[in-house]
Amino acid sequence: MQNTRLTNLFEAIASRLGQWFLNPWRRLSLLLINFFFGFFLGTAISTIAGQRGISDILIAAVLVVLTEVTSRIFYSQSFFSRRSLLVESLNILKVGFIYSMFVEAFKLGS
């Protein structure tokens, strides 16, 4: 990639954000926000898919594939040595999403 002012700006922003998230409390708060967003996303998707009732099977299959791909990325051997914040955030988002699906299933069961 060429070394332009725009790429220099994006690299500077990314490095400053990386330094900012080295603080454990900021990192934990970001992961907690991702968990709650995953919970919200799971509730919203299940509500919308249940309301429309058009392609429930297709949406469920896509969601299962996305969670499995996320698990494959997070638990692969190359990420055990160094876990990036992006991959860890994606995994926490997946955990919140799956937890939301369990809560929705318990709501339907009762």
Image: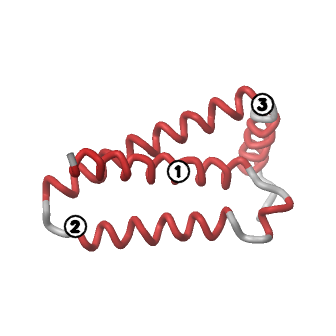
In this image, 77 relative to 87: left or right? Answer: right
- Secondary structure under the numbered disc 2 in the rendered image: helix
Q: Nearer the viewer, mark 2 or mark 1?
A: 1
Disc 1 or 3, which lies upstream in sequence? 3
The three-letter code of the residue at mark 2 reads Asp
Q: Amino acid at mark 1?
A: Val
Q: Quadrant of the N terminus?
A: bottom right
The residue labelled by disc 1 is: 95
Q: Residue at x 52, y 54 (%)?
A: 94
The mark that comes first in sequence, 2 or 1, is: 2
Q: Point out residue 48 in the picture as x, y percentages from the top left corner.
A: 22, 51
Q: Between 5 and 13, which is closer to the camera in this rendering? A: 13
Q: Residue at x 60, y 54 (%)?
A: 91
Q: Residue at x 25, y 72 (%)?
A: 57
Number of marks drawn: 3
Viewer-proximal residue, 89 or 3?
A: 89
Label 2: few (<14), some or many (≥20) within 10 Å? some
Label 2 sits on residue:
56
Circle 1 sits in a helix, a strand or a loop, which is it?
helix
Labels 3 and 2: the sequence-earlier one:
3
Callout 3 amino acid:
Pro
In contact (CB < 8 Å): disc 3 and disc 2: no
Residue at the front extreme, as displayed? 110
Residue 49 located left or right of residue 90:
left
Which residue carries the number 3 mark?
A: 24
